[in-house]
Amino acid sequence: MIRRALLIAALGMLAFCRTLAQEKEYMYEIGPGFGASWAYGDVNRSSALYDPQVAYEVLFRYNTNLRWAFALDFSANGLSADSKDFDNVIPGGGQWSFDRRYWQLGIRPEFNFWNYGWGSDYREKHRLAPFLTAGIGFGWATGESSGDDRTSATLAIPIGLGMKWKMAPRWDMQLTCLWTKTLADGIDGITDPLEMGTTAPVNTDWIGSVMLSVTFSFKERCEKCHNQNE
């Protein structure tokens, strides 16, 4: 009798553990991000993390499976520089400076190095996972410049890497480092000050950013739907 009771208790505990292990998965995430950004280009041609400015974003992510996701983000990146801080020789002895904000709407596929998720099952999910990302975006810059204060628009190619941490079944945190190649020379309001005679591809502007974001997951994934839980 005691053995039967112990067996029933063990089976019940096993079923309970399996229920805990089969955590719900969610398809979408949304949340804010906050960080820093800086400019590479005609003024700053070599210094990493030069004069970082405040950056922020709204992030939406679609998780196709445990390895792949698509991130749609709308970001605002502060950009500032002054040629007096560098030894670059500008033709005519001119001095250049700017204090602008670069806005961008972009879409980026993300590849997780490990199966990323909450709980434990045969897929060996990890709550912490590094990832690579690259995509395309459309951006525009506004603000003050000793060159041209007009709004400048461009297509852009963001490339980067990061780390994801699943804090809870429906809460995630990501640290993302992006290097964005703009396809224009003028995001900083300064066009070809070194008189190189070209604006693409060597004379275009870059934007660096580091963003920490927190997202909330929603829309439970259908476990029995075809091609959704592979």
Image: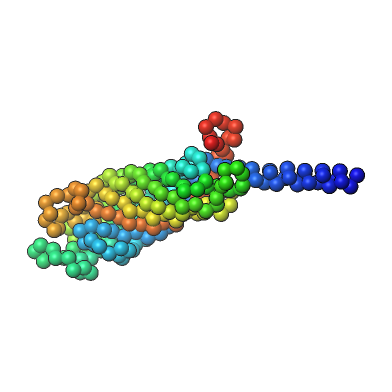
Give the x, y percent position of residue 99: 27, 61
Direction from residue 150 to residue 127 in the image, left or right: right
Direction from residue 160 to residue 81 in the image, left or right: left
Viewer-proximal residue among 147 and 50 = 50
Q: Residue at x 19, y 53 (%)?
A: 203
Direction from residue 217 to residue 110 in the image, left or right: left
Q: Residue at x 10, y 62 (%)?
A: 91
The N terminus, quarter of image = top right
Give the x, y percent position of residue 205: 24, 53
| 99 shown above or below 131 | below
Kindly give the residue lying farthest to the front in the view shown. 3
Kindly give the residue lying farthest to the top in the view shown. 226
Classify residue 72 by image quadrant. top left
Q: In the rendered image, is residue 106 in sight?
A: no
Give the x, y percent position of residue 163: 46, 54
Tell me how the rendering is colored: rainbow
Q: Residue at x 19, y 56 (%)?
A: 190
Give the x, y percent position of residue 180: 31, 51
Q: Residue at x 33, y 57 (%)?
A: 208
Q: In the rendered image, is residue 192 in sight?
A: yes
Kindly give the residue lying farthest to the right in the view shown. 1
- How many labels sit on residues? 0
Classify residue 122 by image quadrant. top right
